[in-house]
Amino acid sequence: MAPTYSDDTDVRKMNHLAQSTSPYLAQHVYNPVDWYPWGEEAIALAKKQNKPIFLSIGYSTCHWCHVMERESFEDEAVAEVLNKYFISVKVDREERPDVDAIYMAAYHAMQGGGGGWPLNMFLTPELKPFYGGTYFPPQSKNGRPGFKQVVAHLGQAWENEGAEVVKSANEFHDQLIARLQVGAAENPAGQLDESNLKLAVDQLMRGVDWENGGWNASGPKFPQVSNLRYLLQSGDAQARQFVLLTCDKMMNGGIYDQLSGGFHRYSVDGIWLVPHFEKMLYDQAQLIELYLDAWLITGKVAYKQVVEDTIGYVLREMRHEQGAFYSAQDAGSEGKEGKFCCWTMRDLAELTDDQRDVVVKWFGMSPAGNFVDFSDPDPLPNLNVLHLANPAMELSADERNSLADGIAKMRELRAARVPAATDDKILADWNGMMISSLARASRVLQKPEYLDAATNAYGFLVQELHDSEANRLAHVWCRGRKDDSDQALSYLHMLQASLAIYQVSLEPAYLAMAIKLADASYEVFYDKENGGFYNSPQRDDLVLRLKGEYDGATPTASSVGTMQFHLLAEITGDKKWLEAVEKSFTAHQSILSSSPASMSLLASALDRQLKAKQHLVIAEGDDDQLVEMLVVAQQVYKPRLVVMGNQGAVGAFSQKLDSLDEKTTAYLCEDYTCKQPVTDAAALREILQSDKAKSLLEMD
């Protein structure tokens, strides 16, 4: 369900968010707080009136953002104080991740870590922060100041001691620049080698939860897919065991939607049982990749089922009619967290006795339930989060039939509920991630419809967001309108999508587009002096220009850019991209030497740089073997294998490898030395699996 936007029939007074297309900003358009969107108007007004800025950053499916709106931003008394002392600005962090990154870094520096959303920062008119927090309760309690009290205190401090506040903010800003070393080159000592890769594994394996998988045994737990995929790629047998344990626990827990497929954002506990129920597109994309890895390594059918069900959910519920993908679905419906997803025993009344008995047993349901939303002043009672209470449970044939029928009935019942709202903005970066996972899954699972979905979404994004003449890519498309903010990750994930489709199709047009996007990324975001990628171009409305230093729920621009430039260098043979990669490693040498686990995707790129290059060059002939060979190439777990053709903008090495006797011919090469070419898919599978068996033997 799409979010509700303002319309002419609502008689309430609208604030300055009325023209925004962001679903998150639209949620706040009737708040009594006189909100402005981030931009020139609000900044100029703050300077003209010499008022500080109250900056509140969130996103439409954020649970605690909804709570704070209900408690504070809809309160007339709170709004009166805010409107008196501040210019209030709302930012959708998904539309402006560059703004979010700056003020989250400031919050971390102020508070010594932590963070989350809503992120509430207080700024001078020059956009320099002097105080900040996340969720504030409406009234002071448990040692935490109430929001109204905070606003009044800071507003009065500005009026009475404004010069001191500005001085303090300027000093903090200078300290923040020094701390983040913005624009500074590192002084590398020593060389990066495989010991850095081993250090990343060692760091990631510290503090793992061997009982329930993941990290942070007491919760909350996030999937942290970049970390898990790095551990799989590392070849460490114990790390592989831990990742597969984590995959099992997540897919059996409440973080996974047992009825509809797809993953919720995170678990509030340490056992993956009770999630915050929002579903993010980027999580689906990354977890599809992880479970594809797990299935290829183990052959466990349940992992394949998770992939198919998650893709089914995305295609069914998260796809725009023109093919691209929406951003997220909300945690709640009808104002209640988890109401759409959870079940009471009474909700099963329409099931037969046999269906109800086995459903209750299978999903671990009870009359008391297992979830209470303590942030809700009037929480719903007796809610059950569905999970597989005992995945090894043996069921009789009759019970299996009753379970299948019961689940089908529950899906019907849930479809009749008021659904959680869908954030219908289309983000180029998250779409690029989803397109990449669909392209790979199409070959791994031999589902051509997945590739159709990937290319349809890709075509929409290129048509609607890419300015071919200027070679610029918009970040957001929503209801026919697009932005002009230029975000590095949009370029880089669409570069990723281009290369992903190219590797499963070998169509030169996708490689050509990849080069265009790489050129733009290099010109706009790449630090040519020091290496690495900035989050955004230099802009007047940004007080800092940052490079990310931590691969969190999604990886940083430097990690994604370095990985994709490396792939492009291998495919095209263009030294420009390899030189950019090497300079990026130098720029991040301190992190890769001391805490490589914090940038696990960058460590994966380093792994690709240090180890033998593995290329599969396929020269198409006049037969029908190409698709079969492309399927085989993806069905063997070889994370460093790069697939390419011999046509288009590929390097000279690949161009020299021709088809034999007009048959599609595959050349498996390591460090540019090739095995005997093969001309049928079965022979290709044999040599790939033989090579895989050797690598797994070395791994153990």
Image: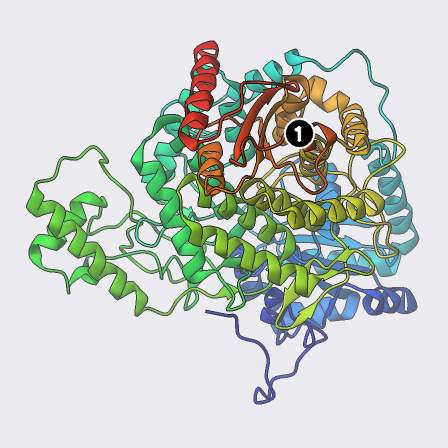
Q: Is residue 98 above or below residue 660?
A: below
Which residue is painted at 53% across and 53% down in the image? 454
Residue 336 lies, in percent from the top left, at 41, 62
Q: Amino acid at mark 1?
A: Leu
Residue 648 lies, in percent from the top left, at 70, 43
Task: Name the residue carrying label 1.
Answer: 602
Q: Is residue 349 above or below residue 227?
A: below
| Figure quadrant of the C terminus | top left
Residue 696 lies, in percent from the top left, at 44, 15
538 or 299: nearer the eye? Answer: 299
Locate residue 167 relative to residue 314 in the image: left or right: right
Secondary structure at numbered mark 1:
helix
Q: Is residue 1 above or below residue 361?
A: below
Q: Is residue 695 above or below residue 125?
A: above
Locate residue 304 relative to residue 457 in the image: left or right: left
Quadrant of res 557: top right
Which residue is painted at 35% across and 45% down in the image? 254
Crowding at mark 1 (Cα within 10 Å: few <14, some 14-19, many 20+):
many
